[in-house]
Image: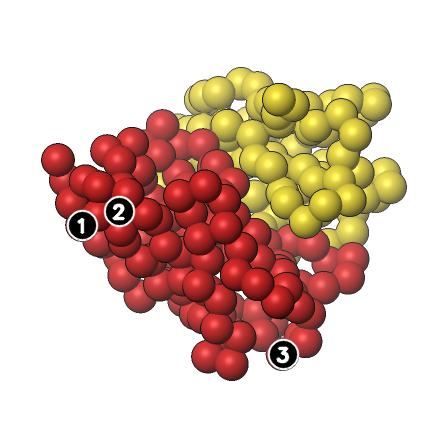
Amino acid sequence: EPEVTQTPSHQVTQMGQEVILRCVPISNHLYFYWYRQILGQKVEFLVSFYNNEISEKSEIFDDQFSVERPDGSNFTLKIRSTKLEDSAMYFCASDGDTDTQYFGPGTRLTVL
Amino acid sequence: AQKITQTQPGMFVQEKEAVTLDCTYDTSDPSYGLFWYKQPSSGEMIFLIYQGSYDQQNATEGRYSLNFQKARKSANLVISASQLGDSAMYFCAIRPPGSARQLTFGSGTQLTVLP
């Protein structure tokens, strides 16, 4: 069964450093998303991506964040200068022409 | 704006019993989708079930069913014959119509299945 994959599973970084979180969505899917979940809290939408451009973004997704689909398979989230409050689980998700969004296993980002 | 409310932070159920997890929603859109996801302690988000606002019948997927009451704006998840492996956090989510496909999640319900 096809699945969304994410790397790394855990990333530890120093405050102010740049991080890139990587995702490989399901191959025939067209819509891609990043969500985050601060420990013990609900899942929050960050950004959606369709047809090689951002289609929606939340207030959380400020200038420190960017997304890219550098090739036909990868979908990345970059945080330019990490803050302590960026520590969270980051989920990538994708969906095709059905109604279901499938989530990856997540990347746990720890900012020290 | 869309909103999901899950009023049960924690629930307990005996193994093999059925359990209902509550979800109410608020939206002004006539068309929307409702989802339930399971998050075990390992952290991944597992899709369980989907209900479209215009679907005539309640969605079912194996032991999961969705008690959809549109007039009351509720979309409760029913898990039949609970198993120990059902112990997890359960999130209800809503998606607006059209090109804005992002999900808005509730705060979740932690379900514990007792042996």
Mark 3, Cα crowd under 10 Å, few <14 / some 14-19 / many 20+, is few
Q: Chain B is drawn in which colour?
A: red
Please, which residue is most extreme toward the top here?
Answer: A8
* Corner quadrant of residue A27: top right
Q: Position of residue A59 (x, y in %)?
A: 61, 58
Q: Mark 2 points at which residue?
A: B111
* Residue in view at x 70 percent, y 28 percent: A26
Q: In this view, does B26 lie to the left or right of B15?
A: right
Question: What's the CA distance linking mark 3 and mark 1?
Answer: 33 Å
On-image quarter of the C terminus of chain A: top left
Looking at the image, is mark 3 or mark 1 nearer the viewer? 1
Q: Callout 1, which amino acid?
A: Phe
* Residue in view at x 22 percent, y 47 percent: B17
Q: Mark 3 points at which residue?
A: B28
Q: Tell me if label 2 and label 1 are in contact, CB under 8 Å.
A: yes
Tell me, what colour scheme is on the image?
A: by chain
Q: Colour of chain A?
A: yellow
Q: Which of B104 and B90 is in front in this view?
A: B90
Q: Name the residue under label 1.
A: B12
